[in-house]
Amino acid sequence: NKPPQGFSGRPFDTRKGLVPFPVIGRVAARYGQTIAKGRLHKGLTFETRKSAQVIAPYEGKVAFSGPFRSYGKLLIIEHNGGYHTLLAGMAHIDVGVGQWVLTGEPIAVMERNGIDKPLLYLEFRRNSQPINPLSWLMTRKGKTSG
């Protein structure tokens, strides 16, 4: 199972400040923010529109895809250089374990009905430890997140 054409193989740590947002939406909770029961938020939560398309923030191989505890559907993408992306809260995941994904490739869809503003959780990990995603994500022109 070889990476697809267009796969750069560059380590994740070479992409600081260049990683696209996984979904169009507003940052509802930030890394390090205190959340339920005094715990600290380990990623970013985006408020999206219904049926929003979720893309792969960076190329890699799908390490996990499916339901996980209270997270609902969870997707974990393994990147070169000891990094992982965790995404949770999607209604439907379109990629399976072992599949290679390219940066910007559609990988999932947010909830279509029920919730007014679906929430997508994003976490970047280096050697299994959560890191602040904001410094990795591309800044959006003329707009600050949050």
Image (cartoon, helix red, strand yellow):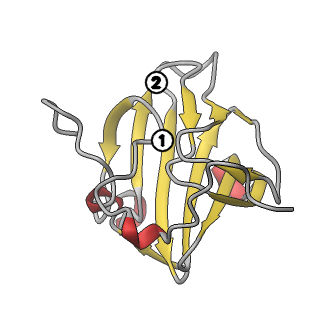
Residue ID for mark 2: 117
Q: Is residue 145 left or right of residue 45?
A: left
- Which residue shows up at 67% across the image and 53% down it? 75
Q: Is residue 88 visible?
A: yes
Q: CA distance from mark 1 to mark 2?
A: 16 Å
Question: In this picture, is 12 found above or below 60?
Answer: below
SS at badge 1: loop
Q: Residue at x 35, y 60 (%)?
A: 133
Task: Check disc 2 and report its element: helix, strand or loop.
Answer: loop
| Count of numbered badges drawn on the protein | 2
Question: What amino acid is at disc 2?
Answer: Lys
Residue 6 - label: none
Residue placed at 60% from the left, 48% from the top? 88
Image position of 82 with respect to 93: above or below? below
Question: Could you say which quadrant of the image residue 110 lies in?
Answer: top right
What amino acid is found at the position of numbered circle 1 in the picture?
A: Pro
Query: Which residue is the extreme one toward the left?
Result: 142
Q: Position of residue 62 (x, y in %)?
A: 73, 58
Q: Position of residue 98 (x, y in %)?
A: 82, 60
Nearest the viewer among 37 and 40 is 40
Image quarter hosting the N terminus: bottom right
Instruction: Residue under label 1, please give it.
Output: 22
Q: Which image quarter: residue 132?
A: bottom left
Q: Residue furthest front?
A: 5
Which image quarter holds the C terminus? top left
- Residue 90: horizontal and vertical position, in percent? 63, 37
Q: Are marks 1 and 2 in contact (CB under 8 Å)?
A: no
Eye-nearest disc, 1 or 2:
1
The location of residue 19, given as percent across then percent down, is 39, 51
